Image (cartoon, rainbow, N blue to C red):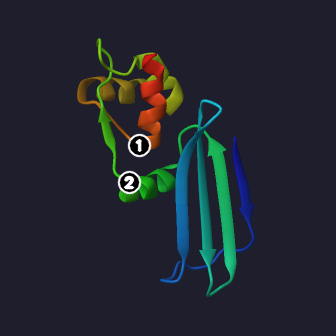
Amino acid sequence: MAEHLVTHSCEPCSSCQDESWQRIADGRLRWEWQHYCPVSRTQACEGGWGPAPEYVREEIVAREGTVRLEVGGPHGIPLKPLRELMALSLPELVHARTHGFEATPVEAALLRGTLG
């Protein structure tokens, strides 16, 4: 479930500041996003559990990069936890099984914890 706080919307400008992050809390993936514009004096924040929305994940990937994880097999991330934790569709899971999964560093830490 996502949480929202929006005080006003503005047209994005060069003064707008966005910050996105992920963390592991109670063994679950948590994401947060904050926006602030000092010019229009607007702010917004959003957060939730599970996979981050694409706009949040894109900011994290741009800043921190990704970690390619092997999926399935004796040394890979198990299919069931990957599908459940990252809310992957069956076609996405098949693609990850074949090509690996590009995880953020926090996602990788959580998924590696499923290796047990």
Q: Residue type at mark 2: give it.
A: Glu
| In the displayed structure image, the side of residue 48 where residue 108 appears, left or right | left
- The one nearer the camera, 100 or 111, is 111
Give the image quarter of residue 27.
top right
CA neighbours of label 2 inside 10 A, class few (<14), some (14 to 19), many (20+): few
Residue in the picture at 52% in, 29% down: 85
Give the image quarter of residue 43.
bottom right
Q: Do the residues labelled 2 and 1 touch (CB within 8 Å)?
A: yes
Q: Residue type at mark 1: give it.
A: Pro
- The one nearer the camera, 83 or 36, is 36
> Is 62 rendered above or below residue 67?
below
| In the displayed structure image, the side of residue 58 where residue 28 appears, left or right | right
Give the SS element for disc 2.
helix
Residue in the picture at 30% in, 23% down: 97
Residue in the picture at 46% in, 16% down: 116
Residue most toward the bottom?
Answer: 39
Q: Position of residue 112 (x, y in %)?
A: 42, 27
The residue to which callout 2 is attached is 64
> Is 20 rendered above or below residue 43?
above
Give the SS element for disc 1.
helix
- Residue 105: give its label: 1
* Residue 89 visible: no
- Mark 2 and mark 1: span between their CA atoms? 7 Å
Residue in the picture at 44% in, 54% down: 60
Give the tally of numbered discs.
Answer: 2
CA neighbours of label 1 inside 10 A, class few (<14), some (14 to 19), many (20+): some
Q: Where is residue 110 in the image (x, y as percent from the top left)?
A: 49, 32
* Residue 30 visible: yes
> Is 78 rendered above or below residue 30?
above
Q: Which badge, 2 or 1, comes first in the chain's sequence?
A: 2
